[in-house]
Amino acid sequence: MIKTDIIIIGAGPVGLFTIFEAGLLKLSCHLIDSLPQAGGQCSEIYPKKPIYDIPGFPSILAGELVDNLMEQAAPFKPGFTLGEAAVDIDKLEDGTFIVTTVKGTKHHAPVVIIAGGLGVFEPRKPPISNIVDFEDKGVEYIIKDPEFYRGKRCVIAGGGDSALDWSIFLVENEIASSVSLVHRNSSFRGHLDSVQKVIDLAEAGRINLITESEVVGLSGDNQLDKVIIQHSKDGEIVIEADHFIPLFGLKPSLGPIANWGMEIEKNAIKVNTVDYSTNIPGIYAVGDVNVYEGKLKLILCGFHEGTIAVQSAFAKIHPDKKNVLKYTTVNGVQGF
């Protein structure tokens, strides 16, 4: 049994910053995450993608943000159970909680803070009959490290910002040997400046832009080597490729969280904005996993929510103690 003051379910940026805010109040934290490493989407989906709305950082790569948050939390010696999804929460007679993972690991604490982001993600896969046969053999649904595609022939499918941005990135940084962008329509859903940049690169012969088309087949001998495209006017087009990357987005799901007895609205947990508590005393929800009037799904908003939640958690854990706000500019950061 792992015992701590606060169990944090979700080790994304919001969960990691919550460690720091709890640590300032001398509250220990243990984090549970289904992913094998901390960082959530920032580590798993777009570690090399720049983020522009973190205060004090005009631009920071998602992976670097995670590294910084881990360094910031380090003085407070957080514990981690990674690669194990939390599947059950049991409330004991004394009001404390036991959280059990899919592998049976048990955690005990008086407070649980759910920072599970948008929940469990599954890629939206195109309806290609044999696509599963080429997963991890040339088919990827997210780009984690663009260097993986160095010198490779890439076919990207999609019409949103991810498809546009990664096509531009792989070409402008001269990473892929060739990039083909396939989209079923003649217009795109992404930002206009990105659309124009792709058009300019296509006209310069640097991107093979194929619109009004869909990828309908894949072929290769245990490794992808050809992508089959159906064009609305020109019929079948076959392109030699090392990688096919359909960027149609991810389908979020609350997963087991939806069965823990909390009020759910719009696939998110309803909270009281006084302290981001749920309808179950002692359980809080912060970051993208929660919903309330005026909610903005931004990392910086999650930082605020986690900060307020741990103030309330302190009062629950230490009802006989008075918490006086102390500024780090005066007191510094004193770890455990």
Image (tube, rainbow, N blue to C red):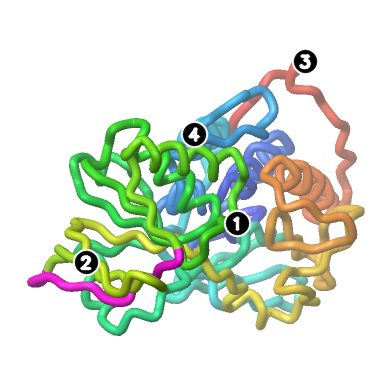
- Asked if residue 102 shows in the view, the reply is yes
Q: Quadrant of residue 215?
A: bottom left
Residue ID for mark 2: 238
Residue ID for mark 4: 61
Give the mark toward the camera: 4 or 2.
2
Q: What residue type is labelled 2?
A: Val
Residue visible at 48% across and 48% down?
164
Residue ID for mark 3: 330
Give the mark toward the camera: 2 or 3.
2
Of residue 237 and residue 2, the one placed in the foreground of this image is 237
Instruction: Rate crowding at label 1 as few (under 14), some (14 to 19) or many (20 or more) other CA atoms within 10 Å.
Output: few
Q: Distance between the residues labelled 2 and 3?
A: 65 Å
- Asked if residue 36 shows in the view, the reply is no
Task: Left or right? Give the position of 172 relative to 34.
Answer: left
- Which x, y percent locates residue 180? 32, 52
Give the mark toward the camera: 1 or 3.
1
Residue ID for mark 1: 189
Q: Distance between the residues labelled 3 and 4?
A: 30 Å
Task: Left or right? Give the position of 163 relative to 265.
Answer: left
- Which x, y percent locates residue 225? 14, 63
